[in-house]
Image (cartoon, rainbow, N blue to C red):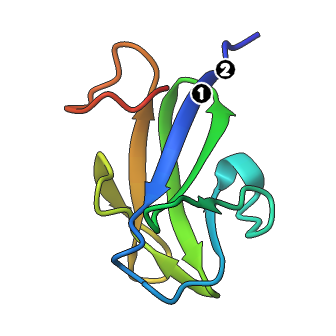
Amino acid sequence: MSLLVPVTFRFSGDLVPGARQVSVVGAFNGWDSVAHRLTRTANGDWTTTIYLTPGRTVYGFWVDGSMWLDPEDDGRVPNAWGSEYSVRFVGSGAPSSRARTA
């Protein structure tokens, strides 16, 4: 059984000031835009914490029906549609320059 790690995702409200809905999507939730919705904070940013298995996580933000990359991700990987997904390394010992777990 894998240990789950709390991971906080944050989307800056400055990127889409009029956003009405922001979700994080990836293989961990079947790319379902309603599974992990972010909550708007008092300063206008959006955030959520979810539990993921350690390792590489491929994801994106779904903002009002459009996919956005995470400007604070740990890297990018190409997808089958000619664009990219964000990558986050989860867990201790992950090759990240920033602490990503709560």
Please give the name of the residue rendered at 28% of the width and 51% of the height, measured from the top-left corner: 75
> Which mark is on residue 14?
none
Q: Nearer the viewer, residue 101 or 46?
A: 46
Crowding near pointer 1: few (<14 within 10 Å), some, many (20+)? some
Is residue 86 depicted above or below 22 in this figure?
A: above
Q: Is residue 27 left or right of residue 16?
A: right
> Which mark is on residue 6?
1
* Disc 1 + disc 2, Cβ < 8 Å: yes
**For the residue marked with disc 1, what is the amino acid?**
Pro
**Rendering coords of residue 63 (x, y %):** 57, 79
**For the residue marked with disc 2, what is the amino acid?**
Leu
The residue tagged 2 is 4
When asked about the image quadrant of residue 74, the answer is: top left
When asked about the image quadrant of residue 76, the answer is: bottom left
Crowding near pointer 2: few (<14 within 10 Å), some, many (20+)? few
Q: Residue furthest left?
A: 97
Q: Nearer the viewer, residue 71 or 20?
A: 20
Q: Nearer the viewer, residue 11 or 57?
A: 11
Please give the name of the residue rendered at 50% of the width and 89% of the height, measured from the top-left corner: 18
**Rendering coords of residue 36 (x, y %):** 72, 56
